[in-house]
Amino acid sequence: MQSPEPFDLILFGATGDLAMRKLLPALYRRHRAGQLPDDGRIIATARSELDRDTFIARVDAAFQERLDAEERDVDTWQGFLERLQFVSVDAAEPRGFDHLGTMLHDRDDRTRVFYLAVAPMHFVGICEHLQNEGLVTDRSRVVLEKPLGHDLASAQAISERIGAIFAEDAIYRIDHYLGKETVQNLIALRFGNMLFEPLWRRDWVRDVQISVTEQVGVGGRAGFYDRTGALRDMVQNHLLQLLCIIAMEPPTNIGADAVRDEKLKVLRALTRLEGQHALRNTVRGQYRAGAIAGQPVNGYLDEEDVPDDSRTETFVAIRAELANWRWAGVPFYLRTGKRLQERAAEIVVNFRDVPHSIFDVAYGAGQPNRLVIKLQPDEGVRLHMMAKSPGDRMQLRPVSLNLDFAEAFQQRQADAYERLLMDVLRGRLTLFMRRDELYAAWDWVEPILDAWNEAGDAPKPYTAGTWGPAASSALLGREDASWYEES
């Protein structure tokens, strides 16, 4: 694959968890794969008063934990370190931006990427300081991590101020779920094959389930998380983006605007959940003390930096519908939460049952077909169907056709951040959210937040290590459905 053009990638928040755990390892792996041009620099910035050698030592220590030994051959590692520079910059004030300007002097002809791996409260300030120092060129791009705002008004305020500095096609709103190999394969599955397209509609699909479940708690993010909650942290971005890809119409091509135009139509087709309608079709929960993998864990209210009376939700389940011809009447169930029984991210398409079974119940009850797209921890696609069990009787049993990506494609698969960083460097916007998508997502989520606030109810408690509140199962049980859980 062709390498991007020479670049300067300026990484704000370079000493933070995201940079050390995901971004720098992703850049190293692309360097090791030979996908970065020789004239490609990574300029790390942080508020800390460090020199370059101290920063390099931190990177080296972090990589010892996160890279396999075979990934760190001496020559490749040293070559990557030569790309790294460091400058102390305070995101909250002008300090250090002049030094950054000195490092970028006479390099206006390079692609210039500003990656803001910092708290969203600093996005606008950083961009304005960059503009004031004359560092935003015609070849500049800015990458914004979530969350983009706390509600629709704040999202609009951030976008308008950043949009006054960077053109829309230079703003990359990143959602790492869209960089996962399985999500890419979902696009290929839908639009590169004819097999499922005739079935991909209300006539044949009973329901769709999108789940992103975690075993971890809030950890060191309690201060941020308690102001955010699961609906803002996961549903407004990750889950709605997955819903868009599973439900959108075929785009005219794979170009950025063609794909994002179709995703926007899905967001605008979502039936609004307001007032009592929102309360009936959503479940919010909060974990209590329990056990994960046999180890006792605290409840949310016992976590450090969480107020004793917090009503922040750590679990959300939603029944959503799309008001369009393809999907009208089909429930889309969304679920996400912390301290649940398993770590998983998957999309489940449950097809309708056969209209009339010709098989006697004594020979095995039939089960509806089901397509399971697994995003983590193991990426793959599985189609569940009925087949005859060997023997002289017509005995039916469920079997599955399994596409395991690790088995089917023997080479190492790039992780989500590797793919998305390369897309930024190459100027590809397809997998990044456009401004109108962001607004449409907040416009749908905000009435749910309002309904919860007006009702004033506390989140339903659930024991850590379970699948969440019982009301989550009851939400599906109203329509004789249940959450898919792999046995």
Image: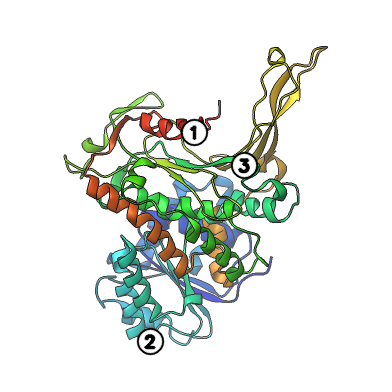
Residue 479's disc number: 1
Q: State the image coordinates of residue 18 (x, y, percent, origin top left).
A: 40, 55
Give the quadrant of residue 399.
top right
Residue 122's disc number: none
Q: Residues within 10 Å of mark 1 (few under 14, many from 20)?
A: few
Quadrant that contains the N terminus: bottom right
The Cα–Cα distance between marks 1 and 2, rounded to whole angstroms, is 59 Å
Looking at the image, residue 78 lies above or below residue 360? below
What residue do we see at 50% from left, 72% from top? Answer: 41
Q: Is residue 17 visible?
A: yes
| SS assignment at label 2 | loop
Along the horizontal axis of the image, is 172 left or right of 352?
A: left
What residue do we see at 28% from left, 64% from top? Answer: 48
Question: Which one is closest to the eye, mark 1 or mark 2?
Answer: 1
Q: Nearer the viewer, residue 126 or 120?
A: 120
**Label 1 near label 3: C-beta < 8 Å?**
no
| Amino acid type assigned to the residue bearing label 1 in the image | Glu
Q: State the image coordinates of residue 414 (x, y, percent, origin top left).
A: 60, 53
**Label 2 near label 1: C-beta < 8 Å?**
no
Marked residue nearer the N-terminal end (1 or 2) = 2
Tag 2 residue: 134
**Label 3 near label 2: C-beta < 8 Å?**
no
The Cα–Cα distance between marks 3 and 1, rounded to whole angstroms, is 14 Å
Tag 3 residue: 205
What residue do we see at 51% from left, 48% from top? Answer: 67
| Amino acid type assigned to the residue bearing label 2 in the image | Gly
Marked residue nearer the N-terminal end (3 or 1) = 3
Question: Which one is closest to the eye, mark 2 or mark 3?
Answer: 3
Q: State the image coordinates of residue 79 (x, y, percent, origin top left).
A: 55, 64
| Amino acid type assigned to the residue bearing label 3 in the image | Val
Q: Nearer the viewer, residue 159 or 207?
A: 207
